Amino acid sequence: MKPVVKVEGQIGTLMLVGQFDFNLHKDFRLASQELLENPSVQEIQVDFDQVPFLDSSALGMLLLLKERATSQKKAMSLVNCRDTVLQVLEIACFNKMFTIK
């Protein structure tokens, strides 16, 4: 399912639904581009509330988004992570590279 983009004030949210894997690559890139190009967005939040699983390609997509956000001086955080998702992020040391709320 395609990510849902929501902007409230200076926070842009990418709400993911279902498994976050390579099948979501194109839709994730398009949705994140929308937030990166929005001048009012100062922080991008990736919402994992509806994500039961993510794979290594998802980790790569998150790294690319962080790199692009940083180059545009936008903050980025990962929010509402389930335990299984949080475990994957911690194993990959993403808790040291990202703000996880």
Image (spheres, grey):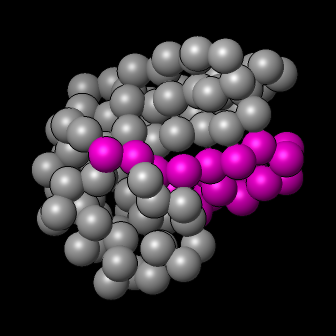
Left or right for 90, reference 49: right
In the image, residue 42 lies at what x, y percent?
A: 75, 34
Q: Name the residue located 54 percent from the left edge and 61 percent from the top edge.
A: 99
Left or right for 4, reference 10: left
Q: Quadrant of residue 17?
A: top left
Q: Quadrant of residue 24?
A: top left
In the image, residue 62 lies at what x, y percent?
A: 51, 56
Q: Name the residue located 33 percent from the left edge and 84 percent from the top edge.
A: 91
Compared to 38, does 23 lie above or below? below
Q: Name the residue located 17 percent from the left edge and 63 percent from the top edge.
A: 83
| Count of number-bearing discs | 0
Compared to 99, does 69 lie above or below? above
Left or right for 29, reference 1: right
Compared to 95, does 28 lie above or below? above
Q: Quadrant of residue 97?
A: bottom right
Looking at the image, can residue 49 be seen?
yes
Q: Name the residue located 39 percent from the left edge and 57 percent from the top edge.
A: 58
Left or right for 80, reference 93: left
Magenta residues, start to end: 61-80
Residue 99 is covered by the magenta coloring: no
